[in-house]
Image: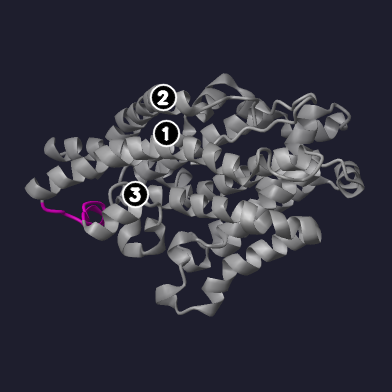
């Protein structure tokens, strides 16, 4: 779901970070594979292995959030005055053009499909009942992008859309809250503020109303991405010192290891506890993109250090990854309806769980990618002004 805001500094050589799209593409594909194998009791050894490998799809959303903070903050860090180019009105126009056309192009057919199916088909599972919940609340909350604020609305029509609403709300806070905080107290204060506000509902409200289902701590992850852009692109002395002396690659690997230990040791972690691994992963991603950006822009790093990152950088800069990254937003929006349609066909053919999972993996995933690229070409591309990669 990570969008591609792009960034530039007028009149200055612009960084072209090809790997950013590659990270988006890999993350979106991983979410698709996660939903292809999720919530089934798998029997075959190969299918069980796929289920284990792709069980961490939730955490890919955090990757998108960090990338969004990084990309939206990059032009601010590159600017001379630390402000958004064109002001708030132009910022809002760019965000709406980037988000809303593809969102409504997927949402409206999904609502129509749910209305038709609801009349002729009784939900067989609780998850299916959630998707088929058509009401005034689910409809208008989705149209206004606030459906993530109530769990009864969040999973209707197209469940992954909850995070689109959450990210849009962070986009509102970016110019009104996060940027003023950064200008006043710097990146460290920005991160503290982001996590303090994001974690306040979790620790301060009762479980039934603490918004854990929409992961408000993503505000802190977004702040981590913003801070990463400041380190990467700001001309201030503090950022220049950090670029030269902080071992960002080592930090990324350390946070990544801590994240892996946390999620592997608690594979059944409840959503209310996911703020910790989300924070560890967000820290790893922020440090990692700083390191990859420095590697991309400069060749001054030691070869031994660069070799550790040669494989992931090659993966993220490869044509399949970057091409997938260009339509990653559409893939995020479309993959769940496509996989659900394949599941319905598998049910008509009376396939067992393994057969249905294979159908989703071998037919549903490629079909979702094709549908995403079509949506990107027919809808997204008409509203994107590609200034530079990032």
In this image, 186 relative to 192: left or right?
Answer: right
Give the secondary structure at mark 3.
Answer: helix
Q: Is residue 200 above or below residue 149?
A: below
Q: Which mark is residue 269?
A: none
- In the picture of the structure, the residue carrying the numbered disc 1 is 330
Q: Is residue 270 above or below residue 307?
A: below
- In the picture of the structure, the residue carrying the numbered disc 2 is 373
Of the pair 72 and 290, the residue shown nearer to us: 72
Q: Nearer the viewer, mark 2 or mark 3?
A: 3
Q: Quadrant of residue 195?
A: bottom right
Q: Residues within 10 Å of mark 2 (few under 14, many from 20)?
A: many
Q: Are marks 2 and 1 in contact (CB under 8 Å)?
A: yes
Instruction: Please tell me which residue is depicted at 73% across the width and 35% down the height of the picture.
Output: 292
Q: Which mark is residue 143?
A: 3
Q: Position of residue 260 (x, y in %)?
A: 60, 53
Of the pair 218 and 87, the residue shown nearer to us: 87
């Amino acid at each position: 779901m990570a969008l591609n805001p792009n960034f530039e500094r007028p009149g200055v050589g612009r960084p072209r970070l090809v790997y950013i799209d590659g990270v988006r593409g890999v993350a979106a594909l991983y979410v698709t594979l996660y939903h292809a194998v999720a919530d089934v009791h798998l029997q075959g050894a190969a299918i069980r292995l796929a289920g284990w490998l792709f069980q961490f799809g939730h955490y890919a959303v955090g990757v998108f959030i960090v990338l969004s903070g990084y990309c939206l903050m990059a032009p601010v860090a590159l600017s001379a005055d630390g402000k958004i180019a064109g002001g708030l009105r132009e910022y809002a126009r760019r965000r709406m053009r980037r988000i809303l056309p593809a969102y409504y192009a997927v949402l409206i057919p999904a609502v129509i499909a749910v209305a038709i199916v609801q009349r002729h088909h009784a939900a067989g599972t609780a998850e299916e009942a959630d998707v088929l919940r058509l009401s005034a609340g689910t409809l208008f909350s989705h149209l206004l992008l606030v459906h993530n604020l109530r769990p009864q609305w969040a999973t209707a029509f197209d469940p992954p859309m909850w995070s689109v609403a959450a990210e849009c709300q962070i986009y509102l806070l970016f110019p009104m809250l996060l940027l003023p905080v950064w200008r006043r107290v710097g990146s460290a204060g920005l991160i503290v503020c982001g996590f303090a506000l994001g974690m306040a509902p979790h620790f301060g409200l009762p479980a039934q109303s603490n918004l854990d289902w929409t992961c408000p701590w993503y505000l802190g992850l977004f702040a981590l991405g913003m801070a990463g852009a400041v380190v990467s692109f700001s001309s201030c002395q503090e950022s220049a010192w950090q670029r030269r002396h902080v071992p960002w690659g080592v930090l990324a690997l350390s946070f990544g290891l801590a994240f892996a230990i946390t999620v592997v040791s608690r594979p059944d972690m409840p959503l209310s506890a996911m703020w910790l691994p989300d924070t560890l992963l967000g820290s790893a991603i922020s440090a990692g993109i700083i390191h990859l950006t420095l590697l991309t822009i400069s060749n001054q790093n030691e070869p031994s250090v660069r070799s550790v990152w040669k494989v992931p950088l090659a993966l993220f800069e490869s044509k399949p990854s970057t091409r997938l990254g260009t339509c990653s937003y559409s893939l995020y929006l479309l993959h769940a309806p496509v996989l659900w349609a394949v599941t319905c066909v598998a049910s008509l053919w009376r396939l067992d769980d393994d057969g249905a999972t294979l159908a989703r993996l071998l037919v549903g995933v490629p079909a979702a990618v094709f549908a995403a690229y079509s949506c990107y070409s027919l809808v997204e591309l008409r509203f994107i002004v590609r200034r530079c990669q990032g």
